[in-house]
Amino acid sequence: MNITINEEDGKVRASVCGRVDTTNAEQFLQGVKPLMEIEKPDIEIDCGELEYTSSQGLRVFLMLQKAVSAKKGSMVLTRMRPQVKEVFDITGFSNIIRIV
């Protein structure tokens, strides 16, 4: 699992690559913590290379969404693979987190 974060014109773009599961969920959390600390976040997360997420990965996405919402920011997940989107749909997370 790898996370890349770039900022351009006030918008933060991140990308997640690989699998997020119990073995690396803490690493994923540490990787997205800088996104939680942005004053007024406007975040786009490219999930095109995210192969899988377990419930532990979903928990981190939810924590990030809550942190962004608390700061009146916005977050969107993009280019999500169908098998990963299905996990978000089944668990109801696609109703909580904006996915395009």
Image (spheres, rainbow, N blue to C red):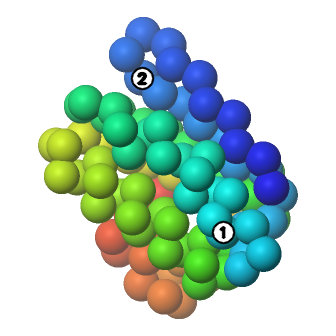
Q: Is residue 38 above or below residue 63?
A: above
Q: Is residue 95 above or below residue 30?
A: below
Amino acid on which the number 1 mark rests in the picture: Ala
Badge 2: how crowded within 10 Å, few (<14), some, or many (20+)? few
Secondary structure beneath disc 1?
helix
- Which of the 4 image quadrants contains residue 36? top left
Is 99 positioned to the left or the right of 24 in the image?
left
The residue drawn where x is 29% and y is 61% is 66
Residue 37 is marked as none
The residue drawn where x is 59% and y is 36% is 14
- Percent x, y for residue 91? 49, 88
Q: Is residue 33 above or below residue 83?
A: above
Q: Which residue is mark 2?
A: 11
Secondary structure beneath disc 2?
strand
The residue drawn where x is 24% and y is 40% is 73
Q: Is residue 79 visible?
A: no
Mark sitting earlier along the chain (1/2): 2
Residue 25 is marked as 1
Is 41 positioned to the left or the right of 77 in the image?
left
- Percent x, y for residue 59? 49, 75
Amino acid on which the number 2 mark rests in the picture: Lys
Task: Give me the C-alpha separation between circle 1 and circle 2.
Answer: 25 Å
Badge 1: how crowded within 10 Å, few (<14), some, or many (20+)? many
- Percent x, y for residue 97? 39, 63
